[in-house]
Amino acid sequence: MFKAIKIGSAFIGVIVGAGFASGQEILQYFTSFGYMGIAAAIVSTILFAFLGMSLTKIGSRLQTLSHKDAIYTISGRYLGFIVDVILVFTLFGVGVVMVAGAGSSLNQQFGLPIFVGSVILSILIVLAMTLNLDKVIAIIGSITPFLLIAIVGIAIYSIFTMELSFSELNPIALEQEKSFPNWFVSGVNYASFNIAVGAGMAIVMGGSEKNEHVAALGGLLGGLGIGVLIVLAHFAIFSQVDVVAAYDLPLLSLVNSISPILGVIMSIILFGMIFNTGLGMFYGFVARFFEPGTKKFLIASIVTVVIGFILSFVGFTDLVSKVYSTIGYMGLFLIIALIYAPIRLKKLGITRR
């Protein structure tokens, strides 16, 4: 059970990055639909649980160290190529968003120039990528419990201190910028996007566990955990949407309104989650092309992160709204592949170990 929790915690850590932990994703994907944001959250949770379990199970069954072999095995040559390209684009694109998010978080909290946070994150990611896979998974999973505690506390505080009723807050929430026509499409797109984000590392994490049942349980727990965090964060932002909607990092601004000291603590947790996802993205991206632990892997890691740092200056909020929705639609190909995966593996004679 401990191994399953470790995998689940790391799965949450990879997916919950700058956009979620700051509240920007929750605001755009869920709170902007008002009351129906909770319905969108339920849709996302169901998809996260099923897809997280599928990814880690496939990784364990195939014992792979990169998403490449797994994707082509379950998808075939043509769909596999499409999904592979999508994942490569996603890993790099979201890595860039995390670097931008690091700059925004330290800028909003401490007034530091945006490039400072981005430089610090880039250096930490390169250093972490020199470690072996087990240590990388342990690092990613270690920060998740702190985020869970923080989100629970913020949600409770927000609901008990809200100055307007939910009926008064709903029209304000509905005025927020939306990237999707309705709550259902938004909920599906959010899960699709995040599964595309987490697929590479989820497969790799599953591949590190020989017991398929343990790996699948880890993915399931991780998916359900993400759903719980979405619901709590949605309630936190929705109950204070009249105050926090104008900020790049609405959850962080909410914590600052409670206490400057708690704001500092939350900014550290936020930076940790940004680091988690950034590390997962760049590690998965480089591992697609080079074997981890080799000199080529290290050189490629440095080059990739430096390029990501340069591209991060487009801006955090713009990157979230443009990059994320695009990846979400493309991620539907991955969902199709995962639904088809059990049939494909059975045809190939690849059965449970």
Image (spheres, rainbow, N blue to C red):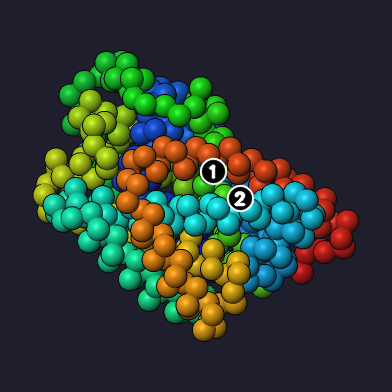
What separation in Å lies between label 2 and label 1 (alpha carbons)? 8 Å
- Label 1 environment density (alpha carbons within 10 Å; few <14, some 14–19, many ≥20): many
Question: Residue 278's quadrant in the figure?
Answer: bottom left
> In the rendering, which numbered label is found on residue 327?
1
Which residue: 35% across, 47% down?
314
The extreme bottom residue here reads: 295
Q: How far from the left and from the top, in percent, is residue 228?
A: 44, 43
- Work out which quarter of the rendered image holds the C terminus and state it: bottom right
Query: Is 223 placed above or below 236 here?
Result: below
Q: Nearer the viewer, residue 144 or 111?
A: 111
Residue furthest out toward the left: 260
Q: Residue at x 28, y 65 (%)?
A: 119
Figure disc tally: 2
**334 up-or-down from 9: above or below:** above
Q: Which residue is mark 2?
A: 86
Tags 2 and 1 touching, CB below 8 Å:
yes
| Nearer the observer, 323 or 213 | 323
User: SS of the residue at dot 2?
Assistant: helix
Kindly identify the amino acid type of the residue bearing the numbered disc 1: Ile
Q: Is residue 225 above or below residue 34?
A: below
